Amino acid sequence: MKIAFLGAIRTVTGSMHLLTINGQRILLECGLFQGRRQESYERNRNLPFDAASLDAMILSHAHIDHSGNIPNLVKSGFQGNIYSTFATRDLASAMLRDSAHIQEQDVAYVNKKRARKGLPPVEPIYTRQDAVNSLNAFVGIGYHRTVPVADGVRLTFYDAGHILGSAIVVLDIEENGRTHRLAFSGDLGRKERPILRDPEIIPPIETLITESTYGNRHHETFEEADRELRRVVNETYQRGGKVIIPAFSVGRTQEIVYTLHQLTEARKIPELPIFVDSPLSTNVTEIFRLHPECFDEEINEFIAAGNNRDPFGFHRLRYIRHVEDSKALNFLREPAIIISASGMCEAGRILHHLKNNIEDPRNTVLIVGWQSPNTLGRRLVERRQKVRIFGEEYDLRARVEAIYGFSAHADREELLDYVREVSHGLQRVFVVHGEEESSLSLADGIRTLGVPEVFVPEPGDEVEF
Protein backbone atom coordinates (compact mmCIF):
# COMPACT_ATOMS: atom_id res chain seq x y z
CA MET A 1 0.00 0.00 0.00
CA LYS A 2 1.22 3.46 -0.88
CA ILE A 3 -0.07 6.92 0.11
CA ALA A 4 0.83 10.07 -1.83
CA PHE A 5 0.10 13.28 0.10
CA LEU A 6 -0.90 15.79 -2.56
CA GLY A 7 -2.89 18.51 -0.82
CA ALA A 8 -3.60 20.12 2.58
CA ILE A 9 -0.09 19.18 3.71
CA ARG A 10 1.35 21.68 6.21
CA THR A 11 -1.55 23.91 5.21
CA VAL A 12 -5.35 23.80 5.54
CA THR A 13 -6.51 23.93 1.95
CA GLY A 14 -6.82 21.66 -1.09
CA SER A 15 -7.17 18.33 0.72
CA MET A 16 -6.07 15.44 -1.54
CA HIS A 17 -4.46 12.06 -0.74
CA LEU A 18 -3.92 9.24 -3.24
CA LEU A 19 -3.91 5.59 -2.14
CA THR A 20 -2.49 2.78 -4.28
CA ILE A 21 -3.78 -0.62 -3.14
CA ASN A 22 -3.58 -3.85 -5.15
CA GLY A 23 -2.53 -1.77 -8.12
CA GLN A 24 -5.67 0.37 -7.89
CA ARG A 25 -5.74 4.12 -7.27
CA ILE A 26 -8.22 5.57 -4.78
CA LEU A 27 -8.39 9.32 -4.14
CA LEU A 28 -9.32 10.63 -0.70
CA GLU A 29 -10.84 14.13 -1.18
CA CYS A 30 -10.44 16.51 -4.10
CA GLY A 31 -10.42 19.96 -2.52
CA LEU A 32 -9.82 23.37 -4.01
CA PHE A 33 -6.52 25.00 -3.11
CA GLN A 34 -7.22 28.55 -1.92
CA GLY A 35 -4.44 31.12 -1.88
CA ARG A 36 -2.97 33.77 -4.15
CA ARG A 37 -5.03 34.07 -7.31
CA GLN A 38 -2.52 32.91 -9.94
CA GLU A 39 -1.06 30.11 -7.82
CA SER A 40 -4.55 28.84 -6.94
CA TYR A 41 -5.65 28.91 -10.56
CA GLU A 42 -2.63 26.91 -11.76
CA ARG A 43 -2.72 24.35 -8.96
CA ASN A 44 -6.44 23.72 -9.20
CA ARG A 45 -6.59 23.58 -12.98
CA ASN A 46 -3.63 21.16 -13.28
CA LEU A 47 -4.33 18.06 -11.22
CA PRO A 48 -1.20 16.26 -9.92
CA PHE A 49 -2.25 12.94 -11.51
CA ASP A 50 -4.00 11.52 -14.55
CA ALA A 51 -7.68 11.73 -13.57
CA ALA A 52 -8.62 8.91 -15.98
CA SER A 53 -6.24 6.54 -14.17
CA LEU A 54 -8.15 6.71 -10.87
CA ASP A 55 -10.44 3.82 -9.95
CA ALA A 56 -12.51 5.50 -7.23
CA MET A 57 -12.79 8.56 -5.03
CA ILE A 58 -13.98 8.88 -1.42
CA LEU A 59 -15.24 12.18 0.02
CA SER A 60 -15.43 12.73 3.78
CA HIS A 61 -17.58 15.88 3.66
CA ALA A 62 -18.74 18.72 1.44
CA HIS A 63 -16.60 21.68 2.49
CA ILE A 64 -14.98 23.24 -0.58
CA ASP A 65 -11.42 22.69 0.66
CA HIS A 66 -12.25 18.96 0.54
CA SER A 67 -14.70 18.71 -2.38
CA GLY A 68 -14.29 21.84 -4.47
CA ASN A 69 -12.23 20.45 -7.37
CA ILE A 70 -14.47 17.43 -8.07
CA PRO A 71 -16.03 19.01 -11.20
CA ASN A 72 -12.54 19.49 -12.64
CA LEU A 73 -11.66 15.89 -11.72
CA VAL A 74 -14.65 14.55 -13.68
CA LYS A 75 -14.10 17.01 -16.52
CA SER A 76 -10.48 15.77 -16.74
CA GLY A 77 -11.48 12.17 -17.39
CA PHE A 78 -12.31 10.52 -14.06
CA GLN A 79 -14.94 7.82 -14.67
CA GLY A 80 -15.14 6.03 -11.33
CA ASN A 81 -17.55 6.38 -8.41
CA ILE A 82 -17.36 9.14 -5.81
CA TYR A 83 -18.45 7.64 -2.48
CA SER A 84 -19.98 9.91 0.17
CA THR A 85 -22.83 9.97 2.66
CA PHE A 86 -26.24 10.96 1.32
CA ALA A 87 -26.16 14.31 3.12
CA THR A 88 -22.70 15.09 1.73
CA ARG A 89 -23.90 14.43 -1.80
CA ASP A 90 -26.85 16.80 -1.30
CA LEU A 91 -24.63 19.53 0.16
CA ALA A 92 -22.09 19.06 -2.63
CA SER A 93 -24.84 19.62 -5.17
CA ALA A 94 -25.49 23.10 -3.77
CA MET A 95 -21.90 23.99 -2.93
CA LEU A 96 -20.19 22.88 -6.14
CA ARG A 97 -22.68 24.78 -8.27
CA ASP A 98 -22.17 27.84 -6.08
CA SER A 99 -18.39 27.45 -6.37
CA ALA A 100 -18.67 27.29 -10.16
CA HIS A 101 -20.83 30.43 -10.19
CA ILE A 102 -18.21 32.30 -8.14
CA GLN A 103 -15.44 31.13 -10.49
CA GLU A 104 -17.38 32.24 -13.56
CA GLN A 105 -17.90 35.67 -12.01
CA ASP A 106 -14.25 35.87 -10.95
CA VAL A 107 -12.98 34.97 -14.43
CA ALA A 108 -15.32 37.52 -16.05
CA TYR A 109 -13.79 40.23 -13.83
CA VAL A 110 -10.23 39.07 -14.58
CA ASN A 111 -10.90 38.92 -18.33
CA LYS A 112 -12.07 42.53 -18.35
CA LYS A 113 -8.71 43.57 -16.91
CA ARG A 114 -6.82 41.27 -19.30
CA ALA A 115 -8.68 42.69 -22.29
CA ARG A 116 -7.56 46.22 -21.36
CA LYS A 117 -3.97 44.97 -21.44
CA GLY A 118 -4.44 43.15 -24.75
CA LEU A 119 -4.09 39.73 -23.08
CA PRO A 120 -6.11 36.66 -24.14
CA PRO A 121 -9.01 35.58 -21.88
CA VAL A 122 -8.73 32.78 -19.34
CA GLU A 123 -11.35 30.16 -18.55
CA PRO A 124 -12.76 29.14 -15.18
CA ILE A 125 -11.40 25.97 -13.62
CA TYR A 126 -14.89 24.59 -14.20
CA THR A 127 -18.35 25.85 -15.05
CA ARG A 128 -21.77 25.33 -13.50
CA GLN A 129 -22.48 22.70 -16.15
CA ASP A 130 -19.28 20.88 -15.16
CA ALA A 131 -20.47 20.94 -11.54
CA VAL A 132 -23.84 19.50 -12.52
CA ASN A 133 -22.18 16.79 -14.65
CA SER A 134 -19.97 15.72 -11.74
CA LEU A 135 -22.98 14.91 -9.56
CA ASN A 136 -23.67 11.81 -11.69
CA ALA A 137 -20.52 10.21 -10.26
CA PHE A 138 -21.70 10.33 -6.63
CA VAL A 139 -22.76 7.13 -4.86
CA GLY A 140 -24.48 7.71 -1.51
CA ILE A 141 -23.81 5.38 1.44
CA GLY A 142 -25.35 5.44 4.91
CA TYR A 143 -23.26 5.44 8.07
CA HIS A 144 -22.08 1.95 9.14
CA ARG A 145 -22.96 0.39 5.76
CA THR A 146 -19.83 -1.44 4.55
CA VAL A 147 -19.41 -1.56 0.77
CA PRO A 148 -16.60 -2.70 -1.58
CA VAL A 149 -15.02 0.21 -3.46
CA ALA A 150 -12.15 -1.66 -5.17
CA ASP A 151 -10.62 -5.14 -5.19
CA GLY A 152 -9.66 -5.94 -1.61
CA VAL A 153 -10.93 -2.58 -0.26
CA ARG A 154 -14.12 -2.17 1.79
CA LEU A 155 -15.38 1.23 2.94
CA THR A 156 -17.37 2.15 6.06
CA PHE A 157 -18.41 5.69 7.07
CA TYR A 158 -18.62 6.74 10.72
CA ASP A 159 -20.05 10.06 11.89
CA ALA A 160 -17.32 12.73 12.22
CA GLY A 161 -19.65 15.27 13.89
CA HIS A 162 -18.13 18.15 11.90
CA ILE A 163 -20.83 19.28 9.46
CA LEU A 164 -23.99 17.66 8.15
CA GLY A 165 -23.05 14.30 6.61
CA SER A 166 -19.38 14.48 7.56
CA ALA A 167 -17.68 11.12 7.92
CA ILE A 168 -14.60 9.40 9.24
CA VAL A 169 -13.47 7.11 6.42
CA VAL A 170 -12.51 3.57 7.47
CA LEU A 171 -11.00 1.21 4.90
CA ASP A 172 -10.60 -2.51 5.48
CA ILE A 173 -7.83 -3.64 3.16
CA GLU A 174 -6.66 -7.06 1.99
CA GLU A 175 -3.38 -6.94 0.10
CA ASN A 176 -0.63 -9.51 -0.50
CA GLY A 177 -2.14 -11.94 1.99
CA ARG A 178 -2.42 -9.49 4.87
CA THR A 179 -5.27 -7.40 6.28
CA HIS A 180 -5.00 -3.79 7.34
CA ARG A 181 -7.41 -1.14 8.59
CA LEU A 182 -6.81 2.53 7.73
CA ALA A 183 -8.86 5.52 8.86
CA PHE A 184 -8.99 9.07 7.54
CA SER A 185 -10.53 11.59 9.94
CA GLY A 186 -11.66 14.10 7.33
CA ASP A 187 -12.36 17.08 9.61
CA LEU A 188 -13.18 15.97 13.13
CA GLY A 189 -16.00 17.66 15.01
CA ARG A 190 -16.54 18.34 18.70
CA LYS A 191 -18.54 16.65 21.43
CA GLU A 192 -21.84 18.10 22.65
CA ARG A 193 -22.28 20.52 19.75
CA PRO A 194 -25.85 21.53 18.96
CA ILE A 195 -27.65 19.88 16.02
CA LEU A 196 -25.13 17.14 15.11
CA ARG A 197 -24.07 13.94 16.87
CA ASP A 198 -20.70 13.61 18.55
CA PRO A 199 -17.78 12.13 16.59
CA GLU A 200 -18.02 8.34 16.70
CA ILE A 201 -15.30 6.13 18.06
CA ILE A 202 -14.24 3.80 15.25
CA PRO A 203 -13.12 0.16 15.51
CA PRO A 204 -9.41 -0.56 16.18
CA ILE A 205 -7.14 0.59 13.34
CA GLU A 206 -3.48 0.30 12.39
CA THR A 207 -3.08 3.55 10.42
CA LEU A 208 -4.69 6.97 10.93
CA ILE A 209 -4.56 10.06 8.72
CA THR A 210 -5.75 12.91 10.93
CA GLU A 211 -6.47 16.59 10.43
CA SER A 212 -4.72 19.17 12.65
CA THR A 213 -6.50 22.46 11.92
CA TYR A 214 -6.49 23.45 15.60
CA GLY A 215 -3.60 21.20 16.63
CA ASN A 216 -2.03 23.92 18.78
CA ARG A 217 -5.11 25.87 19.92
CA HIS A 218 -7.99 25.61 22.38
CA HIS A 219 -11.64 26.64 21.97
CA GLU A 220 -14.11 28.27 24.30
CA THR A 221 -16.85 26.00 25.59
CA PHE A 222 -20.29 26.13 23.96
CA GLU A 223 -21.71 27.54 27.19
CA GLU A 224 -19.21 30.40 27.05
CA ALA A 225 -20.06 31.00 23.39
CA ASP A 226 -23.79 31.17 24.19
CA ARG A 227 -23.18 33.67 27.01
CA GLU A 228 -21.03 35.85 24.76
CA LEU A 229 -23.61 35.79 21.96
CA ARG A 230 -26.33 36.82 24.42
CA ARG A 231 -24.15 39.67 25.76
CA VAL A 232 -23.29 40.99 22.29
CA VAL A 233 -26.93 40.96 21.13
CA ASN A 234 -28.22 42.66 24.27
CA GLU A 235 -25.54 45.36 24.36
CA THR A 236 -26.02 46.16 20.67
CA TYR A 237 -29.80 46.27 21.08
CA GLN A 238 -29.43 48.74 23.97
CA ARG A 239 -27.34 51.01 21.72
CA GLY A 240 -30.04 50.81 19.04
CA GLY A 241 -27.65 49.08 16.64
CA LYS A 242 -27.51 46.03 14.38
CA VAL A 243 -25.44 42.86 14.78
CA ILE A 244 -23.76 41.88 11.50
CA ILE A 245 -22.53 38.25 11.51
CA PRO A 246 -20.34 36.95 8.67
CA ALA A 247 -20.91 33.19 8.78
CA PHE A 248 -20.09 30.15 6.69
CA SER A 249 -23.14 28.80 4.88
CA VAL A 250 -22.72 25.19 6.05
CA GLY A 251 -22.91 24.46 9.76
CA ARG A 252 -22.05 27.82 11.31
CA THR A 253 -25.14 29.63 10.02
CA GLN A 254 -27.47 26.84 11.17
CA GLU A 255 -25.87 26.69 14.63
CA ILE A 256 -26.15 30.45 15.11
CA VAL A 257 -29.81 30.37 14.00
CA TYR A 258 -30.59 27.50 16.37
CA THR A 259 -28.85 29.24 19.27
CA LEU A 260 -30.69 32.52 18.59
CA HIS A 261 -33.95 30.54 18.48
CA GLN A 262 -33.25 29.07 21.92
CA LEU A 263 -32.19 32.44 23.39
CA THR A 264 -35.33 34.10 22.00
CA GLU A 265 -37.63 31.39 23.39
CA ALA A 266 -35.93 31.65 26.78
CA ARG A 267 -36.35 35.46 26.64
CA LYS A 268 -32.63 35.95 27.14
CA ILE A 269 -32.46 38.28 24.15
CA PRO A 270 -35.11 40.70 22.88
CA GLU A 271 -37.47 39.71 20.09
CA LEU A 272 -35.76 41.51 17.24
CA PRO A 273 -35.81 40.66 13.52
CA ILE A 274 -33.21 38.16 12.33
CA PHE A 275 -32.26 37.83 8.66
CA VAL A 276 -30.20 35.12 6.94
CA ASP A 277 -29.11 36.90 3.77
CA SER A 278 -27.39 34.26 1.65
CA PRO A 279 -28.95 32.14 -1.10
CA LEU A 280 -26.46 29.33 -0.42
CA SER A 281 -27.17 29.40 3.33
CA THR A 282 -30.88 29.25 2.55
CA ASN A 283 -30.44 26.27 0.22
CA VAL A 284 -28.16 24.51 2.70
CA THR A 285 -30.66 24.98 5.52
CA GLU A 286 -33.29 23.24 3.40
CA ILE A 287 -30.85 20.33 2.98
CA PHE A 288 -30.42 20.19 6.78
CA ARG A 289 -34.17 19.65 7.11
CA LEU A 290 -33.93 16.64 4.78
CA HIS A 291 -31.41 14.76 6.93
CA PRO A 292 -32.66 14.11 10.47
CA GLU A 293 -30.51 10.95 10.48
CA CYS A 294 -27.58 13.28 11.22
CA PHE A 295 -29.22 15.08 14.17
CA ASP A 296 -28.36 14.53 17.81
CA GLU A 297 -30.80 13.71 20.61
CA GLU A 298 -31.02 17.32 21.80
CA ILE A 299 -32.36 18.71 18.54
CA ASN A 300 -34.71 15.77 18.03
CA GLU A 301 -36.18 16.49 21.47
CA PHE A 302 -36.39 20.19 20.56
CA ILE A 303 -38.41 19.30 17.44
CA ALA A 304 -40.62 16.84 19.33
CA ALA A 305 -41.43 19.35 22.10
CA GLY A 306 -43.83 21.46 20.00
CA ASN A 307 -46.18 21.30 17.04
CA ASN A 308 -44.07 21.36 13.86
CA ARG A 309 -41.27 23.04 15.79
CA ASP A 310 -38.50 24.04 13.37
CA PRO A 311 -34.99 24.61 14.83
CA PHE A 312 -33.98 26.55 11.69
CA GLY A 313 -37.03 28.80 11.46
CA PHE A 314 -39.17 30.81 13.86
CA HIS A 315 -41.39 33.86 13.76
CA ARG A 316 -38.56 36.41 14.12
CA LEU A 317 -36.42 34.82 11.41
CA ARG A 318 -36.51 35.47 7.68
CA TYR A 319 -34.40 33.89 4.94
CA ILE A 320 -33.47 36.26 2.09
CA ARG A 321 -33.03 34.92 -1.44
CA HIS A 322 -33.67 37.82 -3.80
CA VAL A 323 -31.26 40.70 -4.40
CA GLU A 324 -34.04 43.28 -4.02
CA ASP A 325 -34.88 41.99 -0.54
CA SER A 326 -31.19 42.00 0.38
CA LYS A 327 -30.83 45.63 -0.73
CA ALA A 328 -33.89 46.57 1.32
CA LEU A 329 -31.97 45.63 4.47
CA ASN A 330 -29.75 48.66 3.85
CA PHE A 331 -32.67 50.88 4.86
CA LEU A 332 -33.30 49.17 8.21
CA ARG A 333 -33.09 51.69 11.02
CA GLU A 334 -34.21 49.58 13.98
CA PRO A 335 -32.06 46.95 15.76
CA ALA A 336 -31.71 43.64 13.92
CA ILE A 337 -29.39 40.68 13.38
CA ILE A 338 -28.09 40.03 9.86
CA ILE A 339 -26.27 36.76 9.14
CA SER A 340 -24.61 36.61 5.74
CA ALA A 341 -21.84 34.85 3.80
CA SER A 342 -18.96 34.63 3.25
CA GLY A 343 -17.50 33.70 6.62
CA MET A 344 -14.18 35.47 5.97
CA CYS A 345 -15.82 38.53 4.35
CA GLU A 346 -14.09 37.96 1.02
CA ALA A 347 -17.14 37.78 -1.24
CA GLY A 348 -20.92 37.77 -1.27
CA ARG A 349 -23.63 39.89 0.28
CA ILE A 350 -21.82 40.34 3.60
CA LEU A 351 -19.61 42.95 1.88
CA HIS A 352 -22.64 45.18 1.23
CA HIS A 353 -23.80 44.88 4.84
CA LEU A 354 -20.35 45.72 6.15
CA LYS A 355 -20.04 48.68 3.79
CA ASN A 356 -23.35 50.07 5.00
CA ASN A 357 -22.88 49.43 8.73
CA ILE A 358 -19.25 49.56 9.91
CA GLU A 359 -19.11 53.35 10.17
CA ASP A 360 -21.94 53.45 12.74
CA PRO A 361 -20.65 53.00 16.34
CA ARG A 362 -24.02 51.62 17.45
CA ASN A 363 -23.49 48.48 15.36
CA THR A 364 -21.48 45.33 16.07
CA VAL A 365 -19.62 43.09 13.64
CA LEU A 366 -19.60 39.66 15.27
CA ILE A 367 -16.93 37.26 14.01
CA VAL A 368 -17.76 33.60 14.73
CA GLY A 369 -14.95 31.74 12.94
CA TRP A 370 -11.21 31.78 12.37
CA GLN A 371 -10.12 34.36 9.80
CA SER A 372 -7.28 33.59 7.39
CA PRO A 373 -4.43 36.10 7.01
CA ASN A 374 -4.90 38.71 4.28
CA THR A 375 -8.71 38.56 4.40
CA LEU A 376 -11.11 41.38 5.24
CA GLY A 377 -12.33 39.28 8.16
CA ARG A 378 -8.82 39.21 9.63
CA ARG A 379 -8.47 42.98 9.22
CA LEU A 380 -11.75 43.45 11.08
CA VAL A 381 -10.62 41.16 13.91
CA GLU A 382 -7.40 43.19 14.11
CA ARG A 383 -9.60 46.30 14.38
CA ARG A 384 -7.84 48.23 11.65
CA GLN A 385 -8.92 51.88 11.71
CA LYS A 386 -9.69 51.82 8.00
CA VAL A 387 -10.69 48.86 5.82
CA ARG A 388 -11.14 48.62 2.09
CA ILE A 389 -14.42 47.26 0.67
CA PHE A 390 -15.15 47.24 -3.07
CA GLY A 391 -12.00 49.33 -3.60
CA GLU A 392 -13.06 52.14 -1.23
CA GLU A 393 -11.84 52.89 2.29
CA TYR A 394 -14.26 52.95 5.23
CA ASP A 395 -13.68 53.99 8.85
CA LEU A 396 -14.21 51.07 11.22
CA ARG A 397 -16.36 52.71 13.90
CA ALA A 398 -18.61 49.74 14.67
CA ARG A 399 -17.61 47.45 17.51
CA VAL A 400 -15.93 44.20 16.53
CA GLU A 401 -16.43 41.12 18.72
CA ALA A 402 -15.12 37.59 18.17
CA ILE A 403 -16.58 34.34 19.52
CA TYR A 404 -14.65 31.19 18.61
CA GLY A 405 -16.62 28.67 20.66
CA PHE A 406 -18.89 27.89 17.70
CA SER A 407 -16.03 26.25 15.81
CA ALA A 408 -16.93 22.95 14.13
CA HIS A 409 -13.33 21.67 14.39
CA ALA A 410 -11.95 19.72 17.33
CA ASP A 411 -9.25 21.67 19.16
CA ARG A 412 -5.91 20.31 20.33
CA GLU A 413 -7.18 18.49 23.41
CA GLU A 414 -10.19 17.11 21.57
CA LEU A 415 -7.98 15.79 18.76
CA LEU A 416 -5.58 14.19 21.26
CA ASP A 417 -8.50 12.69 23.20
CA TYR A 418 -9.81 11.13 20.00
CA VAL A 419 -6.44 9.64 19.06
CA ARG A 420 -6.16 8.31 22.62
CA GLU A 421 -9.56 6.62 22.24
CA VAL A 422 -8.47 4.76 19.08
CA SER A 423 -4.83 4.21 20.01
CA HIS A 424 -5.10 0.52 20.95
CA GLY A 425 -3.23 -1.27 18.17
CA LEU A 426 -2.50 1.99 16.36
CA GLN A 427 0.86 1.71 14.60
CA ARG A 428 1.23 4.97 12.68
CA VAL A 429 -0.36 8.39 12.33
CA PHE A 430 0.00 10.88 9.48
CA VAL A 431 -0.81 14.45 10.50
CA VAL A 432 -2.28 16.58 7.68
CA HIS A 433 -4.64 19.53 7.10
CA GLY A 434 -3.10 22.10 9.41
CA GLU A 435 -0.68 24.98 9.20
CA GLU A 436 2.85 23.68 9.72
CA GLU A 437 3.14 24.89 13.33
CA SER A 438 -0.22 23.34 14.18
CA SER A 439 0.59 19.98 12.53
CA LEU A 440 4.00 19.72 14.18
CA SER A 441 2.54 20.60 17.58
CA LEU A 442 -0.20 17.97 17.31
CA ALA A 443 2.33 15.37 16.13
CA ASP A 444 4.40 16.02 19.28
CA GLY A 445 1.27 15.53 21.39
CA ILE A 446 0.41 12.25 19.65
CA ARG A 447 3.92 10.93 20.29
CA THR A 448 3.34 11.35 24.03
CA LEU A 449 0.42 8.89 23.68
CA GLY A 450 2.86 6.13 22.75
CA VAL A 451 2.01 5.77 19.06
CA PRO A 452 5.07 4.08 17.49
CA GLU A 453 5.27 6.16 14.28
CA VAL A 454 4.02 9.73 13.82
CA PHE A 455 4.70 11.63 10.60
CA VAL A 456 4.03 15.14 9.33
CA PRO A 457 4.44 14.67 5.56
CA GLU A 458 5.92 17.22 3.22
CA PRO A 459 3.83 18.18 0.14
CA GLY A 460 4.16 15.42 -2.48
CA ASP A 461 5.62 12.83 -0.10
CA GLU A 462 4.88 9.18 -0.87
CA VAL A 463 4.92 6.55 1.86
CA GLU A 464 4.79 2.80 1.29
CA PHE A 465 4.13 0.21 4.00
Image (cartoon, rainbow, N blue to C red):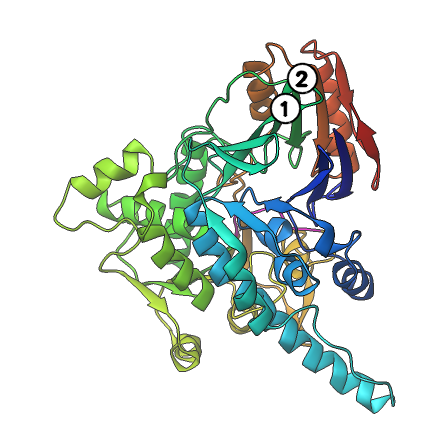
The correct choice, above or below, for 341 with respect to 422 in the image is: below
- The residues colored magenta run 367-372
Give the percent coordinates (x, y) of residue 7: 74, 45
Q: Tell which residue pokes out farthest to the left in this image.
A: 307
> Disc 1 on helix, strand or loop?
strand
Q: Is residue 289 left or right of residue 402?
A: left
Specify the principal SS of the magenta part.
Answer: loop
**Is residue 81 toward the left or the right of residue 333 in the image?**
right
Residue 184 percent across, percent down from the top left: 61, 32
Amino acid under disc 2: Arg
In the picture as drawn, the residue positioned furthest to the right comes out as 118
**Residue shown at 19%/49% (left/top)?**
309
Give the CA distance from mark 2 to mark 1: 6 Å
Quadrant in which the N terminus appears:
top right
Whether the magenta-drawn stretch holds residue 113 is answered as no
Q: How many marks?
A: 2
Q: Position of residue 411 (x, y in %)?
A: 59, 30
| Side of 257 where 47 appears, left or right | right
* Among the 4 quarters of the image, the one containing residue 188: top right
For the point 46% across and 26% down, the residue is 200
Q: Amino acid at mark 1?
A: Glu
User: Mark number for residue 103?
Assistant: none
Q: Identify the image quadrant of residue 399.
A: bottom right
Residue at numbered disc 1:
174
Q: Closer to the camera, 265 or 7?
A: 7
* Residue matched to label 2: 178
Looking at the image, residue 455 lies above or below residue 57: above
Q: Quadrant of the C terminus?
A: top right
Q: Nearer the viewer, residue 73 or 151?
A: 151
